[in-house]
Image (cartoon, coloured by chain):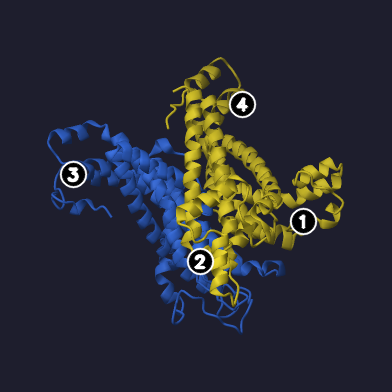
């Protein structure tokens, strides 16, 4: 199959999967009982209840209700978010910047550290550094992110006092406008270096916590694909022509080992996405993860539905991009559905 | 559960060839697995954790009426580790941390065994139908699997548990809904691969029924990666469940590690580190042990997929 055909096929399947996902999300909201519950107040007459049912279309058959909801989603109307007392769409977009900024920094941590560690271990196969890398990556996959966050807070916040929870020092950020919603970028746009460093300081612990699991995944993949590449004939050829080992590693083996590593970046992204819920709770970070956690505890279905749908579409898109990138990078790959 | 020994029309335990081969293979695999020190370390931790789970009623006085609820000693709140009667200290509500740590192992064992049994069964059935029958059914089932995989695991489980309301049973249900898909995908791929082998054709020529070929030749040869994944999931499920209960989806006061970490979290700014630290370490050890063993199994049984 040609790459163009492959991409077209994937793009055609994507909307079908999104529709499937939206059906699951909608069904979820109806499994937990009648959604009318959150609109009801004490001492309402049956006539008033019926009127509410009428207004929100809750007396229609389920498929009609689904279409009404899906139509709303397409036009940007996802209902009312009870936890943030504003329309869901507004609430989502006012919080997405905080989560995005944390995830970007976590991804930077995960990709640089993961590739570095994987190379370090893979180039020293079956020696101590390799064993240490292996232990590190299995620990990363086993680490309860909530516990890791708490350990970091106990050490760096309670005992050393270097960092704190929250997103920034309010007095430093009082005079800074937020055109992008990313505090580091906003600080730079305002030309305020102090504010920039302040934002970085608050980002450090959450980004490390969030990036840890993904670091482990990337390190592990990088290690095993590097080991595989180092066994290839072209590496022997490079050595035979007298190239120093350092250059064999850097110019030849590592470059090729990066190709399969691209595939786990999608998996790592899923890790980051779901990690934000817990990390934002513990670090009091005002993003969409904590918004979801609040909604979960208060049974705010409109918010839960919007969050699940939004993160799934994000997750699907990233995976599509990763697969296409992989197909371009490695022409040997057999393209199948 | 598909049980080979009670399959219709097949003798209870075949006495010849395949079983002897499989027993010998099991011996070889065990030897290879035990050669890896990290795998052995994982096995040792698993044995210790299982011992804790089984011995919890002997090591502590079970709380009445429900031993899975934390006993409260309101007179001794926030006691540090080493306090007489409270070796690992108490929580802000007077719960004994050691009790929670020990009974949490029991909770985790039940949880992981239940969820792994359900998800492996469902996954193997769906994946077998798709892979063995193929055609339109395969296409439909795999698109459903794609849809399930489109939502990140933890978020999906979180949403299900949230709409059903906070309870540990709902967490078990939510995890079962989320975790079966991987098995379906794995077993389908394996079966499609195994079906192409000559011995399957040979069985077809001898006139064996399709179901018999599936049970006798296809399933036993496809199951290895499922076992590896199930081992990894024994850890992953406890990790995910603890995350859900940390967020607040288990009933309060349950002797479960995530609940305890959540209870202890408020105290850390005041220097009360113990109520979160010990239970969290148990979650880590549990997941680590099963990951070490699963990883070692994969290296031996299935070296080509290493690192995925």
> Which residue does the numbered mark 2 point to in the structure image?
B165
> Which residue does the numbered mark 3 point to in the structure image?
B212
Looking at the rendered structure, the secondary structure element under dot 3 is helix
Point 59% across, 62% down: residue: A300
> In the image shown, does B130 or A328 lie closer to the viewer?
B130
Point 56% across, 59% down: residue: A56
**Residue A218 sits in quarter:** top right
Kindly report which numbered mark, 3 or 1, lies closer to the viewer in this rendering.
3
Looking at the rendered structure, the secondary structure element under dot 1 is loop
Cα distance in 3D space between marks 2 and 3: 44 Å
Q: Residues within 10 Å of mark 3 (few under 14, many from 20)?
A: some
**Residue at mark 1 shares a chain with residue at mark 4:** yes
Cα distance in 3D space between marks 4 and 2: 53 Å
- Image vertical order of residue B66 relative to residue A95, above or below: below
- Image vertical order of residue B62 relative to residue B223, above or below: below
Looking at the rendered structure, the secondary structure element under dot 2 is loop
Image coordinates for residue A167, horizontal then vertical, percent? 75, 54
Q: Decide: marks 4, 2 in contact (CB < 8 A)? A: no
The extreme bottom residue here reads B75
The extreme top residue here reads A241
Kindly report which numbered mark, 2 or 1, lies closer to the viewer in this rendering.
2
Q: How crowded is mark 2: few (under 14 residues within 10 Å), some or many (20 or more)?
A: many
Image coordinates for residue A257, horizontal then vertical, percent? 54, 29
Q: Which chain carries label 1?
A: A
**Residue at mark 2 shares a chain with residue at mark 1:** no
Colour-to-chain, blue? B
> Which residue does the numbered mark 1 point to in the structure image?
A162
Kindly report which numbered mark, 1 or 4, lies closer to the viewer in this rendering.
1
Note whether residue B56 is visible. yes
Colour-to-chain, yellow? A
> Which residue does the numbered mark 4 point to in the structure image?
A250
Q: How crowded is mark 4: few (under 14 residues within 10 Å), some or many (20 or more)?
A: few
């Amino acid at each position: 199959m040609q790459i163009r055909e492959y991409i077209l096929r994937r793009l055609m399947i994507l909307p079908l999967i999104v529709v499937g996902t939206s059906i699951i999300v909608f069904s979820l909201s109806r499994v937990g009982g009648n959604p009318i519950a959150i609109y009801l107040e004490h001492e309402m007459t049956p006539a008033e209840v019926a009127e509410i049912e009428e207004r929100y279309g809750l007396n229609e058959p389920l498929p009609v209700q689904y279409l009404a909801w899906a139509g709303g989603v397409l036009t940007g109307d996802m209902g009312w978010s009870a936890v943030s007392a504003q329309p869901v769409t507004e609430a989502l977009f006012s919080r997405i910047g905080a989560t995005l900024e944390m995830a970007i920094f976590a991804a930077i941590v995960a990709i640089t550290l993961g590739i570095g560690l994987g190379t370090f271990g893979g180039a020293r196969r079956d020696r101590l550094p390799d064993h240490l890398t292996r232990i590190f990556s299995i620990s990363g996959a086993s680490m309860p992110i909530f516990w890791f966050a708490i350990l970091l807070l106990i050490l760096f916040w309670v005992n050393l006092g270097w960092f704190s929870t929250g997103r920034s020092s309010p007095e430093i950020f009082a005079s800074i406008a937020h055109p992008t919603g990313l505090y580091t970028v906003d600080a730079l746009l305002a030309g305020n270096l102090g504010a920039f460093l302040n934002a970085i300081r608050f980002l450090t612990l959450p980004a490390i916590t969030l990036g840890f699991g993904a670091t482990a995944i990337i390190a592990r993949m990088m290690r095993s694909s590097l080991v595989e590449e180092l066994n290839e004939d072209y590496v022997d050829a490079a050595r035979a022509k007298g190239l120093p080992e350092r250059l064999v590693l850097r110019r030849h083996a590592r470059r090729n080992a990066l190709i399969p590593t691209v595939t786990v970046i999608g998996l790592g992204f899923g890790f980051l996405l779901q990690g934000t819920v817990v990390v934002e709770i513990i670090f009091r970070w005002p993003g969409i993860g904590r918004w979801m956690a609040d909604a979960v505890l208060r049974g705010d279905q409109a918010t839960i539905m919007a969050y699940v749908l939004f993160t799934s579409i994000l997750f699907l898109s990233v995976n599509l991009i990763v697969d296409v990138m992989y197909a371009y990078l490695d022409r040997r790959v057999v393209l199948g559905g | 559960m598909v049980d080979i020994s009670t399959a219709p029309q097949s003798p209870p335990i075949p006495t010849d060839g395949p079983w002897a081969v499989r027993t010998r293979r099991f011996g070889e695999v065990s030897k290879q697995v035990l050669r890896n020190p990290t795998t052995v370390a994982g096995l040792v931790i698993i044995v210790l954790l299982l011992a804790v789970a089984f011995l919890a009623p002997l090591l502590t006085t079970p709380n009445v009426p429900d031993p899975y609820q934390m006993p409260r000693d309101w007179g001794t709140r926030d006691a540090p580790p080493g306090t007489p009667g409270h070796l690992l200290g108490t929580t802000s509500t007077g719960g004994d941390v050691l009790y929670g740590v020990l009974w949490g192992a029991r909770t985790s064992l039940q949880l992981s065994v239940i969820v792994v049994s359900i998800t492996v069964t469902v996954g193997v059935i769906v994946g077998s139908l798709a892979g063995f029958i193929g055609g339109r059914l395969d296409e439909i089932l795999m698109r459903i699997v794609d849809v399930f995989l489109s939502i990140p695991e933890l978020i999906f489980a979180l949403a299900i548990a949230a709409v059903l309301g906070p309870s540990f049973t709902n967490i078990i249900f939510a995890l079962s809904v989320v975790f079966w898909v991987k098995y379906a995908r794995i077993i389908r791929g394996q079966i499609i691969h195994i079906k192409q082998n000559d011995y399957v054709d040979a069985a077809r020529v001898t006139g064996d029924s399709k179901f018999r070929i599936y049970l006798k030749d296809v399933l036993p040869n496809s199951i290895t990666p499922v076992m590896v994944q199930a081992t990894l999931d024994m850890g992953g499920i406890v990790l995910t469940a603890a995350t859900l209960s940390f967020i607040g989806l288990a009933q309060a006061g349950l002797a479960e590690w995530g609940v305890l970490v959540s209870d202890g979290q408020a105290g850390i700014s005041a220097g009360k580190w113990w109520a979160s630290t010990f239970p969290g370490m148990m979650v880590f050890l549990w997941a680590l042990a099963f990951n070490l063993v699963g990883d070692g199994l994969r290296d031996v049984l299935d070296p080509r997929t290493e690192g995925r």
